[in-house]
Image (tube, coloured by chain):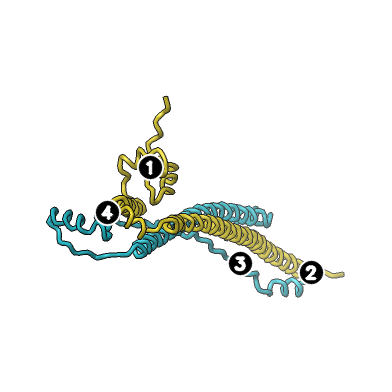
Amino acid sequence: MLGLKGMMIMGAVMATMAGGFYLYYQDTQKRMATLVQNAAKLETAVQMNEQTIGSLQQSYAAAQAELTALNTEFLNIRRQNQQLATKLQQIDLTAAAIANAEGIERAVNRGTENAGRCFELLSGAELTDVERSAQNATAFNKECPWLYDSYKSRGLLKPPAPRN
Amino acid sequence: MIAISLAACSSPQPREIKISAVPIEKPPLTLPPVDELNLRKVEWIVINKDNIDAVKTRLESRGQAFAFYALTGDGYGNLGLNFSDIRALVQQQQAIIVAYENYYKESNAALDRANSQIRNQAAQADLANSEAQENSSWLRRNVPRN
């Protein structure tokens, strides 16, 4: 027979155990909540890292595309620069000056004016009416005819007159 | 049982991870345009042994002295080639500036997209966290908090 004293002791033990279990449960739930939060945050961090990697890959691809475009542009510029050298190889300037001084004088002055105008245009100078109305690259400027296409593509030239 | 429960309670709580992801706002780069060139007129006079007198007469009629800084045919050709090289260099520099500009714009657009996605993900994570907190324990729903 346990008696009243024994029952009270048992009750106290059971109450202590129940309290212990409650505290244990509370603590476990708190840990679980923190761990769930951590898992969510880590998942977010992983996604952010993936975004960053994706962004870096995009930047790298963009840089590569720009480099390719730039190399093509440089190739064109070198080709354009070669044109004068090729032209000069075909002309004997000394012989031309002896044979036709007046003619070559006009040509070199026109060429110098055109070449200077190329620098002005490259610096962003406004087009003259003659340049704006040019119907082809040679009429635009014989020293830098390639600028014609650039201005045309930007819609800065007058459209060609309609043919009757 | 009590000993086990108490031992479990005594272990350290898991550390809460804090992630900081603040988008970086880049200040816009505004640069002034280059000065426009307005080149001065340069006049070439071609002289040979046959026209030297005619040139002299022409200059005197204009009141100009008969004195020259002269170039040979080859020298003139080289001068032209040098100018052509400088023009090509200017064009190359311009192409590089355009490439930088394109890359800068593209990078800004990519950064804006990434920042927007990060903000969305952070909002989703906050929502998931609050839901996790709410659902973590039925006791939390039923037992009033301190």
Which residue occupies the foreground of this view, B60 or B18?
B60
Is residue A128 left or right of B121 when viewed as pictured? left
Q: Same chain for marks 4 and 3?
A: yes
The residue wearing badge 1 is A139
Label 2 chain ID: A
Q: Colour of chain A?
A: yellow
Q: Amino acid at mark 1?
A: Ala
Label 3 chain ID: B
The residue wearing badge 2 is A10
> Mark 3 and mark 4 in contact (Cβ < 8 Å)?
no
The residue wearing badge 3 is B16
Q: Same chain for marks 3 and 2?
A: no
Specify the quadrant that holds the N terminus of chain A: bottom right
Q: Residue shown at 69%/71% (left/top)?
A: B9
Q: Same chain for marks 1 and 3?
A: no
Q: CA distance from mark 1 to mark 4?
A: 21 Å
Q: Which mark is residue B38?
A: 4
Q: CA distance from mark 1 to mark 2?
A: 112 Å
Q: Which of the marked residues, 4 or 3, is nearer the chain's N terminus?
A: 3
Query: Between tags 4 and 3, which lies in front?
Result: 4
Q: Colour of chain B?
A: cyan
Q: CA distance from mark 1 to mark 3?
A: 74 Å
Q: Residue furthest front?
A: B50
> Mark 2 and mark 3 in contact (Cβ < 8 Å)?
no
